[in-house]
Image (cartoon, rainbow, N blue to C red):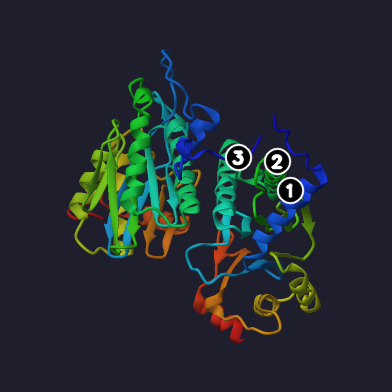
Amino acid sequence: MALPLFDPAHDPGPDFTALLNREHGRVLPAPSENHVSVPHGTTVLALRFDGGVIMAGDRRATEGHSIAHRSMEKVFPADRYSAVAIAGSAGMAVEMVRLFQVQLEHYEKVEGVSLSLSGKANQLAQMVRAHLPLAMQGFVVVPLFCGFDVVEGTGRIFTYDAAGGHYEETDFQATGSGGRDARTTIKLGYRDNLSRAEAIELAVLALYEAADADSATGGPDLTRGIFPIVATVTKEGYSSVEESEIAERFEAAIERRRSLGGNAGGTLR
Amino acid sequence: MTMPYYVAPEQVMKDRAEYAQKGIARGRSLIACVYDAGVLLVAENPSRSLHKISEIYDRIAFAGVGRYNEYDQLRVAGVRHADTKGFAYSRSDVDARSLANLYAQHLGNVFTHEMKPLEVEILVAELGHGQRPTQLFHVAYEGTITDEVNFAVLGGEAEPIRQQFEESFTAGWGLAAALKAAARALAGPDRSLGAQDLEVAVLAEGNGRRTFRRLSDGELTTLLAS
């Protein structure tokens, strides 16, 4: 191994993926003709609140109709001020997140400054687009990206499609197989300037509804003590919400539903 | 037909060394030392954007003196090496020793084979963790690598600075004491250096996975006045 020095014409700059391709050939596995069954991740969501943005995801990974993992993590810090959540082919998605995390840190170290939030969103779009040949074979990866824009002082959310298109959402979004149920729940409970507590409550209810209606989304696993992951990104940076706080909210929600025969009973709760 | 001049290899090496030393001596010096919470790096550098001290990886810092464009290229190569290695294996497999060896090989090769040696001296510092000790690797312009104990001084006028700093060095001292001693040693007997003349960073726990942290002007002023 020698120092990775390049002549100016071939210098990859702060682009970590280009560096890897130069150094080690292809990073992501080449497309093959054979379809294989791989674990899939399911419901993830993001919504804005007065201090920034909240991101949450269930813990279930499925392989066809069976449960492959019960405690998979789908919400990750991308860097200090942003978070990424994944739905889709689990192995590929986790690898894409790992590459994305290194890319953001690599850029920051080489250039001496962080990328802007739009720059980060665009980088992720390029990774999803580069993944298109694999997506065509069924290994679809659809991330959800959010962060705190330190210049504008607000939380921002970006969604992606399998072809690498990325779109900025105004207030909230959810993707994955249970995304539609989660989105509807958030839509019913959303208003501007939710507090942190209200936003976490809404995220919890949205995941509850998604798990209630979608077989591939895992609800709170009370037997094993496994709860969905909720994280906040504010001007203080990325922070995971304590599992005890999430557990408490789920248990309270379940208790309310139990007393009403499984329904919300007129209001979102 | 003209005959090429014969120059003795000893002379060639001597000339190159002299050339590199002169280039390095034109710049300001730098001190790195251990203190009770980690590693402190102090450079005399009035610029706030052209850094002499930078982050390489979670627990590794880089410092260079001499020609900016040359050591900055080495810094970027170090970041690339570390990030590639950490991505291919695991974050804990990235260590300062192998990086310092690569730097030494590169500087040695350039010194012997190229027209012009690199006019730089660099330091690779690693904050210890578990089985791994805190280490300071000093790599000179011709590729000599030294594993320094407690502190390292880089730059053209290293010897008087080293002597003065050695007198004040105390094992287990705090950040303020170490910083003040370093500022005094870098200034020498006739000058004094304030927060605006110094670039300071630490490798210390308490900042999560990435232990590298730059000290702001405000923090420096407070520490220097304490």
- Disc 2 from disc 1: Cα separation: 8 Å
Q: Which residue is mark 3?
A: B85
Is label 3 in a helix, a strand or a loop? helix
User: Mark 3 is on which residue type?
Assistant: Lys
Q: Quadrant of the N terminus of chain A?
A: top right
Q: Nearer the viewer, residue A111 or B10?
A: B10
Between marks 2 and 3 in the image, the one whose residue lies nearer the viewer: 2
* Image position, residue B159 (x, y; %): 77, 69
Q: Chain of mark 3?
A: B
User: Mark 2 is on which residue type?
Assistant: Asn
* Image position, residue A50 (x, y; %): 28, 65
- Disc 3 from disc 1: Cα separation: 22 Å
Q: With A235 as the anchor, is B116 left or right in this view?
A: right
The reply to whether residue A254 is visible in this rendering is no
Q: Which residue is mark 1?
A: B143
Classed neighbour count for the residue bearing mark 3: other residues with Cα under 10 Å, few (<14), some (14–19), many (≥20): some
Which of the labelled discs sits on residue B109, or is there none? Answer: 2
Q: Chain of mark 2?
A: B
Q: Nearer the viewer, residue B116 or A127?
A: B116
Q: Quadrant of the C terminus of chain A?
A: bottom left
Which residue is rendered at x = 59% and y = 42% of the image?
A: B81
Between marks 3 and 1 in the image, the one whose residue lies nearer the viewer: 1
**Seen from this angle, which residue lies furthest top?**
A33
Q: Earlier in the sequence, mark 2 or mark 3?
A: 3
The reply to whether residue A51 is visible in this rendering is yes
Contact, mark 2 vs mark 1 (Cβ under 8 Å): yes
Which residue is rendered at x = 38% and y = 36% of the image?
A: A127
Q: Earlier in the sequence, mark 2 or mark 1?
A: 2
Q: Chain of mark 1?
A: B
User: Mark 1 is on which residue type?
Assistant: Gly
Is label 2 in a helix, a strand or a loop? helix
